[in-house]
Image (tube, rainbow, N blue to C red):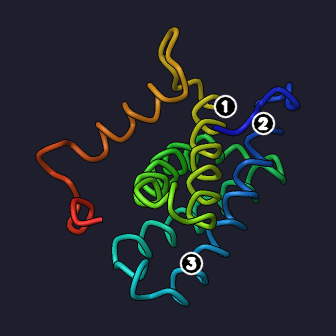
């Protein structure tokens, strides 16, 4: 997970993490389209596109101080967790997808902290696992995820 030590303000960290996640998701989308046979799965691209769009909106709202960030922040947590989930199987095989996995996790964590969604003594990994469990119940894995 990304380091948060250099950011003492949760809003500044979330603004940085979401802007970076947007940029890296955009790079990864182009990369996946170029390597269509390996990474062009519909679910992979859909989750990358969702994360890119939502992170861009979140970064913009935070940059201008909009109070709508609280509403969009929940969606950003979910979209970033889903993006990390589809990149995770490739993280040890591909540097671009590893970079995207890390950026998506950092965005999820930053937005989760900003919105105070963490449970008492919950680690970043526990939070990620809980968000995924609530988003993708074991019996309802999205199509294509099991095949990745």
Outermost top residue: 120
The residue to which callout 2 is attached is 11
Quadrant showing the N terminus: top right
Q: Residue at x 20, y 67 (%)?
A: 143
The residue to which callout 3 is attached is 29
Taking the image as shown, residue 23 lies to the left or right of residue 65, namely left
Q: Secondary structure at mark 1?
A: helix
Label 1 – label 2 distance at C-alpha? 6 Å
Q: Residue at x 41, y 60 (%)?
A: 86
Label 2 – label 3 distance at C-alpha? 27 Å
* Mark closer to the chain start, 3 or 1: 3
User: x, y percentage for residue 111?
Assistant: 62, 39
Residue 23 found in image quarter = bottom right
Q: Residue at x 60, y 84 (%)?
A: 30
Q: Are marks 2 and 3 in contact (CB under 8 Å)?
A: no
Taking the image as shown, residue 28 lies to the left or right of residue 147, namely right
Outermost front residue: 93
The residue to which callout 1 is attached is 114
Q: Nearer the viewer, residue 72 or 45?
A: 45
* Mark closer to the chain start, 1 or 2: 2
Q: Secondary structure at mark 2?
A: helix
* Mark closer to the chain start, 2 or 3: 2
Assess disc 1: are there few (<14), some (14-19) or many (≥20) residues with their C-alpha within 10 Å of its C-alpha. Answer: some
Q: Secondary structure at mark 3?
A: helix
Q: Residue at x 70, y 52 (%)?
A: 18
């Amino acid at each position: 997970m990304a380091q948060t030590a250099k950011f003492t303000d949760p809003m500044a960290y979330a603004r940085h993490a979401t802007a970076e996640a947007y940029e890296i998701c955009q790079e990864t989308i182009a990369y996946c389209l170029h390597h269509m046979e390996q990474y062009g799965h519909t679910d992979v691209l859909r989750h990358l596109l969702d994360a890119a769009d939502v992170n861009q909106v979140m970064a913009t709202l935070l940059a201008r101080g909009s109070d709508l960030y609280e509403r969009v922040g929940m969606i950003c947590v979910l979209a970033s967790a889903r993006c990390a989930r589809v990149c995770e199987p490739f993280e040890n095989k591909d540097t671009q997808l590893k970079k995207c996995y890390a950026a998506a996790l950092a965005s999820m964590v930053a937005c989760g902290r900003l919105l105070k969604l963490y449970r008492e003594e919950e680690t970043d990994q526990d939070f990620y696992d809980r968000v995924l469990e609530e988003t993708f119940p074991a019996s309802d894995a999205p199509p294509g995820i099991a095949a990745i």
